[in-house]
């Protein structure tokens, strides 16, 4: 099971991305903001920023998750991935309420990402040095 944890985290991350896209679509309908507009009601703008920020964060996180998992840290990368997910969910829910409340979730998500980055670098470095 432990070697499959990164795959589970990836599927959960995809559900998170879908959830943020759904929230934007819902906000578009609720506040009458037709695509391709990206501004309007403040609640729509917060939902849109949550989606974009989550996409940006996922682009940093997912490759480092899989590099860490591939180079010998599958279990710990998966744990760091769960931390990242918890942080991003906290971030999204807080930001949707009030932009100023997003900091704690951002920090927790960043900690999860940095952990996967460190594991990926250590694992790759170990392989490169072993030659």
Image (tube, rainbow, N blue to C red):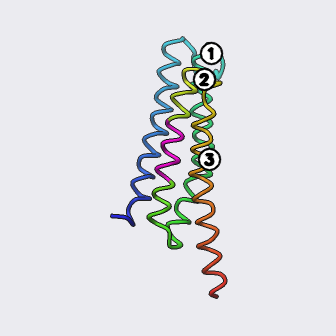
Q: Which residue is mark 3?
A: 110
Q: How many marks?
A: 3
Residue visible at 62% across and 60% down in the picture: 117
User: Main SS type for the magenta part?
Assistant: helix
Give the vertical position of 124 relative to 68 (above or below): below
Residue 57 x/y as whole percent: 61, 45
SS assignment at label 2: helix
* Residue 4 falls inside the magenta stretch: no
Vertical placement of residue 77 versus 19, above or below: below
Q: Which residue is mark 2?
A: 46
- What mark, if any, has residue 42 been given in the picture? 1
Which circle's residue, 1 or 3, is located before the other in the chain?
A: 1
Q: Position of residue 3 (x, y in %)?
A: 39, 66
Q: CA distance from mark 1 to mark 3?
A: 25 Å
Magenta-highlighted residues? 81-89
Q: Residue at coordinates 42% horizontally, 41% vertically from top-left? A: 15
**Residue 54 image label:** none
In percent of the image, x 40 and y 59: which residue is there?
Answer: 5
**Which image quadrant for residue 131?**
bottom right
Mark in front: 2 vs 3: 3
Secondary structure under tag 1 reads helix
**Residue 21 at x, y percent in the picture:** 50, 32
- In depth, the one of 49 and 112 nearer the eye is 112
Residue 52 figure quarter: top right
From the viewer's perspective, is 98 left or right of 12? Answer: right
Across and down, in percent, residue 118 comes to 63, 63
**Does 88 lie within the magenta span?**
yes
3D distance between C-alphas at marks 2 and 3? 20 Å
Task: Give the Cα distance between marks 2 and 1.
Answer: 6 Å
Q: Is residue 108 above or below residue 95?
A: below
Mark 3, residues whose alpha carbon is within 10 Å: few (<14), some, or many (≥20)? Answer: some
């Amino acid at each position: 099971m432990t070697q499959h944890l990164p795959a589970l985290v990836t599927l959960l991350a995809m559900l998170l991305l879908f959830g943020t896209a759904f929230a934007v679509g819902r906000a578009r309908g609720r506040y009458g903001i037709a695509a391709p507009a990206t501004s309007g009601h403040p609640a729509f703008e917060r939902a849109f920023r949550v989606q974009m920020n989550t996409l940006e964060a996922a682009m940093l996180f997912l490759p480092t998750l899989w590099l860490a998992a591939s180079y010998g840290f599958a279990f710990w990368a998966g744990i760091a991935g769960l931390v990242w997910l918890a942080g991003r969910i906290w971030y999204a829910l807080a930001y949707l309420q009030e932009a100023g409340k997003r900091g704690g979730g951002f920090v927790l998500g960043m900690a999860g990402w940095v952990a996967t980055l460190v594991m990926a670098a250590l694992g790759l470095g170990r392989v490169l040095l072993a030659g």
